[in-house]
Amino acid sequence: MIRLHFDTDDLRRITLAPAPNALWEAVLSVRGLRAPTAGTGRSHPAAGQWRRRCNDGLADRAGVLLDLVPRDGYLPDFLLQPAAGDLATAIDLARRTPADRLAADLRVLPGTGGTGGAQEPPSRWTLELAAGAPAARRVLAADLSTYFASSIAPLWPRVRTDGAADRALRAEMLLRGGVDALLTTLAPTWRWDPPVLHLPSRSDYDVPLCGRGLLLMPSWFAMGPMIRYQADEPTVLAYPMHVPERAGTPAAPPGAALGPLLGGTRAAVLRSLREPATTTALAGRVQVSLAAASQHAGVLRNAGLVRTTRIGTAVLHTLTPLGAALLSGEPPTA
């Protein structure tokens, strides 16, 4: 479990990235192709089509990226340039990474004697890059550009469109339900227990944000949370973006898409509140325990989706305008 610890300044400094990061998406896509059992993190047809098209000739497409991107575990921080507004700028910033930081980043890759453990020894090119050799930097920049052009560019308009939809969703959650709503609905398996955001992971560590804030970055290729921590910058949290259904796919019933956003049981609780219910009635509708019904209602209430009113010894749960809007697929009224 990764635990992000917020203080008051951090909660005031949560920002949304304007778009997916082209360089980081390219890096994560290489990982997806290198891990056949993991897929790309997406189950919709576009992901499968992309994978089938790009799987052949990966070595020729990716070049030295195969030396930098392991199948799982740590990814070098210099390959995420959150300040870059476009691919060319991001590649240039990565190419100009100071040699001491390159060495620090690359030492923890598998086989380089760091925390990644000893697997394959580092390539000669990796050692040259870790030393900051100009020729190795040029190869890195060239291969990043070539891979993006051959593998990501045809998909990039869709990635940007899906990223814009995800950003609008997150902004709406923040506008209607505040920070609690935003952090509660980032991913169905993540848990916001103020002031700590719990992220499922095979690793176990705590990340204090130290008042520098958090940059939320949607990712089409991420299969889970990805953290970039720099002591003098806001922490970056890349998260799997919510990908909407496309035109031409079979129409889903209203509210059916909430499962990937909230989790199946929580989405069922929200759908069941189309008609107001007490906690006892809610538990009966969804067939969960009273404690579970109360807990799910509390999470939805913190997210601004449900309103709870005490009536004598009972409580009545009703949808808020935002909750009703999510179920109907229509924008909420002011």
Image (spheres, rainbow, N blue to C red):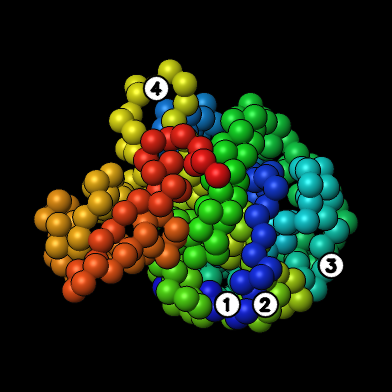
**Residue 110 sits in which quadrant?**
bottom right
Judging by the rendered image, the residue that carries numbered circle 4 is 249
Mark 3 crowd level (few <14, some 14–19, many ≥20, 10 Å Cα): some
Find numbered disc 2 in the image and state the secondary structure of the residue it sits on.
Answer: helix
Q: Position of residue 283 (x, y in %)?
A: 16, 59
Please state if 333 lies on the left or on the right of 235 as rendered: left
Disc number lying in front (1 or 2): 2
Query: Which residue shows up at 44% across the image and 69% down it?
Result: 192
Which is more toward the observer, 8 or 279?
279
Q: CA distance from mark 3 to mark 4?
A: 47 Å
Disc number lying in front (3 or 2): 2
Mark 2 crowd level (few <14, some 14–19, many ≥20, 10 Å Cα): few
Disc number lying in front (3 or 4): 4
Q: Name the N-terminal-most of marks 3 and 2.
A: 2
Judging by the rendered image, the residue that carries numbered circle 1 is 6
Which is more toward the observer, 3 or 123?
3
Q: Name the N-terminal-most of marks 3 and 4.
A: 3
**Residue 54 sits in which quadrant?**
top right
Mark 4 crowd level (few <14, some 14–19, many ≥20, 10 Å Cα): few
Q: Is residue 62 visible?
A: yes
Q: Check the image and report above or below for 38 versus 185.
A: above
Q: Name the N-terminal-most of marks 1 and 4.
A: 1
Find numbered disc 4 in the image and state the secondary structure of the residue it sits on.
Answer: loop
Identify the mark at residue 142; answer none if there is no mark. none
> Given the image, on which type of amino acid does mark 2 rest?
Asp
Find numbered disc 3 in the image and state the secondary structure of the residue it sits on.
Answer: loop
Judging by the rendered image, the residue that carries numbered circle 3 is 98
> Given the image, on which type of amino acid does mark 3 rest?
Pro
Q: Name the N-terminal-most of marks 3 and 1.
A: 1
Q: Name the N-terminal-most of marks 2 and 4.
A: 2
Query: Which residue shows up at 39% across the image and 36% down it?
Result: 328
Judging by the rendered image, the residue that carries numbered circle 2 is 9
